[in-house]
């Protein structure tokens, strides 16, 4: 469920211009920064597996597309080492500032760009690889982004994408009425945003149209119990996002409060489970 890209839901971007941070779907407040850090812990193994499939290694120049505050960017910078470089692109100025400070603190070779995807500066055939998670879902024309990335990749360069395939699979057992209604309203809210929250299912066809080869696809599903760290990923998302759904008028304040009360009741049941939205991983090659 936005990564650093803003992770149960990810980044938002307007076509051809940098967007004011108020458009960031989950916001850029301190609470969201902390949530992204937690999310990174839950998803770090999946990221590293993707980087292995992408063949990312020391000396490479990599792009972290929709990097957010850069938790993955920092790890990728250690991966490529002193002879490599990582470019992190995000439209949220506060997150780019956070990444720059962390990069300086750790002495890493990171080029942090505050930019929309359309305006990001990438040299032709300058990249060995690209990582993108929960960012293309918020772009009006993700196919154009793929085409732009293709021109920046070297021959044989790979792009690793992790995006939602079918967000409505997000559900709980047992089900509580107010919480079920809140999850459905969250999905409606995301469907009203620019782009397509379920963009992952369309990536292979888009890639074929722009001339990128599909090397690999796999579903990534997470089923969480209250005692597991993974449980805190959807829980922290709902605690932040349901209030924003109510602000958009898709829930009343009372309904959002009731949904969170149901979430607390669910979390107190050891046998309870949350099925998180399924992500599709796709590896593309020039």
Image (cartoon, rainbow, N blue to C red):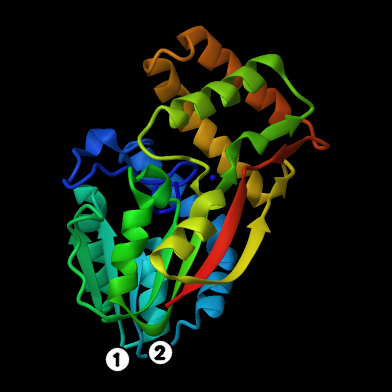
Q: Which residue is mark 1?
A: 83
Residue shown at 37% from the left, 55% from the top = 143
Image side of residue 153 versus residue 237, left or right: left
Residue shown at 45% from the left, 57% from the top = 206
State which quadrant residue 27 falls in.
top left
Q: Quadrant of the C terminus?
A: bottom left
State which quadrant residue 218 falls in.
bottom right
Label of residue 130 in the image: none
Q: Which residue is mark 2?
A: 58
Q: Position of residue 43 (x, y in %)?
A: 56, 58
Image side of residue 89 versus residue 136, left or right: left
- Is the residue marked by circle 2 packed among few (<14), some (14-19), or many (20+) residues within 10 Å? some
Q: Quadrant of the N terminus?
A: top right
Camera-side residue of 225 and 282: 282
Q: Position of residue 70 (x, y in %)?
A: 34, 61
| SS of the residue under disc 1 | loop
Distance from disc 2 to disc 1, alpha carbons, whole Å, reads 7 Å
Camera-side residue of 172 and 37: 172
Q: Are marks 2 and 1 in contact (CB under 8 Å)?
A: yes
């Amino acid at each position: 469920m936005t990564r650093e890209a803003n992770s149960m839901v990810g980044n938002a971007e307007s076509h051809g211009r940098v967007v004011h941070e108020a458009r960031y779907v989950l916001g850029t407040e301190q609470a969201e920064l902390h949530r992204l850090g937690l999310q990174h812990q839950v998803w770090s193994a999946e990221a590293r597996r993707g980087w292995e499939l992408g063949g990312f290694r020391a000396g490479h120049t990599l792009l972290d597309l929709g990097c957010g505050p850069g938790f993955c960017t920092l790890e990728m910078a250690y991966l490529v080492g002193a002879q490599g470089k990582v470019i992190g692109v995000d439209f949220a100025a506060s997150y780019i500032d956070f990444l720059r400070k962390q990069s300086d603190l750790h002495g890493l070779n990171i080029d942090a760009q505050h930019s929309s995807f359309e305006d990001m500066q990438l040299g032709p055939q300058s990249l060995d690889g690209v990582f993108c998670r929960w960012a293309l879902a918020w772009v009006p024309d993700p196919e154009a982004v793929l085409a732009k990335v293709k021109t920046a990749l070297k021959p044989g360069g790979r792009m690793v994408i992790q995006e939602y395939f079918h967000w409505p699979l997000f559900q709980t057992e047992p089900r509580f009425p107010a919480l079920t209604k809140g999850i459905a309203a969250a999905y409606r809210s995301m469907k009203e945003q620019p782009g397509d929250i379920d963009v992952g299912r369309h990536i292979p066809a888009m890639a074929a149209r722009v001339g990128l080869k599909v090397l690999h696809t796999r579903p990534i599903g997470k089923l969480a119990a209250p005692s597991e760290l993974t449980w805190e990923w959807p829980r922290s998302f709902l605690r932040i996002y349901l209030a924003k759904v109510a602000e958009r008028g898709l829930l009343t304040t009372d309904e959002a409060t009731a949904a969170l009360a149901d979430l607390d009741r669910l979390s107190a049941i050891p046998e309870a489970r949350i099925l998180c939205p399924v992500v599709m991983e796709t590896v593309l090659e020039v």
